[in-house]
Image (tube, rainbow, N blue to C red):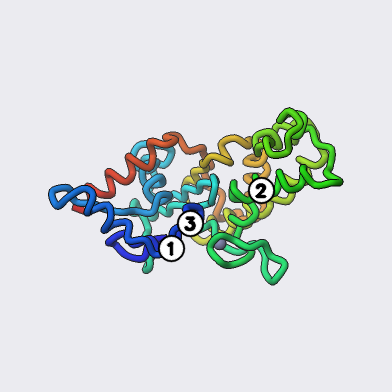
Amino acid sequence: MLRDRRGTVVNAPNLGWRDVAFGELLAAALGPRRPAHVFNDVNAIAWGERVAGAARGVDDALAVFVGTGIGAGVIARGQLIDGSSHCAGEIGHVKVAWGDGAAPCGCGQRGCVEAYVGGAHVAAHITRTLAAPRAPRSLALALAGGDPAAVTPSHVDQAAQDGDAWALEYWGTLAPLLAIALGNAVAMLNPRRLVLGGGLLSRTPLLREQAVMALMLAAPTACTEALEIVDAELGDDAGLLGAADLARRSE
Ligand SMILES: [Zn+2]
């Protein structure tokens, strides 16, 4: 999360950063002849998809990326929405659970969708569950060569596709949580196109399919009638492209 246009990073939980004057550090490293601009990474990725990827030609789009964390970029009437304190699109920290029993999140709160469906939490849950003394017997473990620490979300997705009970049950808890966050965002923003991407979701086709099905049930029909749900197209290039174009527009 950014605090200001000078690029002060308030909190980047997955990097362990708090109040880092990243913009100033970058400007000092580049020197006075090269102006520096700092953007939220997912906003830059979303804008890259708008400029040359899966959201091109669409004025109202929501791009959600589920990787280590979960973030989104909101494009309304052709503009990237930044918000009053640069927090627009922080979909990973919308709440899907409440109270002391809700899972703790890297942002310091509890019950955020990222604390359940973010890749870091999914990987930790898989290892913790499959390494426990009375662990469920899962095909995912066999697919990873028997080492609980080597089981990836991709193995779990594959196991679920093959009918593995534990994998299906786990995906069955995650998909509705992701769908709640996506459905609420779709109801709020009414995008024409929902772009889905990120390291976790791009490797777990069944989880993606289940979440999309639940999303269509969770969001009001009037908000989904014209909605197109597509995959991100540009991979790692999206952030570079988006940041470059945003910087150009900021000059
Ligand atoms: Zn959070």
Using the image as rendered, state which of residue 4 and residue 53 is in the foreground: 4
The amino acid beneath tag 2 is Ala
**Residue highlighted by disc 3:** 16
Question: Is 149 on the left-hand or right-hand side of 235?
Answer: right
**Residue highlighted by disc 2:** 124
The amino acid beneath tag 1 is Arg
**Residue highlighted by disc 1:** 18
In the displayed structure, would residue 172 be above or below residue 103?
A: above
- Mark 1 Cα shell of 10 Å, populated few (<14), some (14-19), many (≥20): few
User: Which residue corresponds to the image point at 80% horizontal and 47% vertical from the top-left?
Assistant: 132
User: Which residue corresponds to the image point at 53% horizontal and 63% vertical from the top-left?
Assistant: 107
Can you name the residue that lies furthest to the left here? 33
In which quadrant is the N terminus drawn?
bottom left
Q: Quadrant of ligand 1?
A: bottom right
Q: Secondary structure at mark 2?
A: helix
Where does residue 30 sit, x and y in percent of width and height? 21, 48
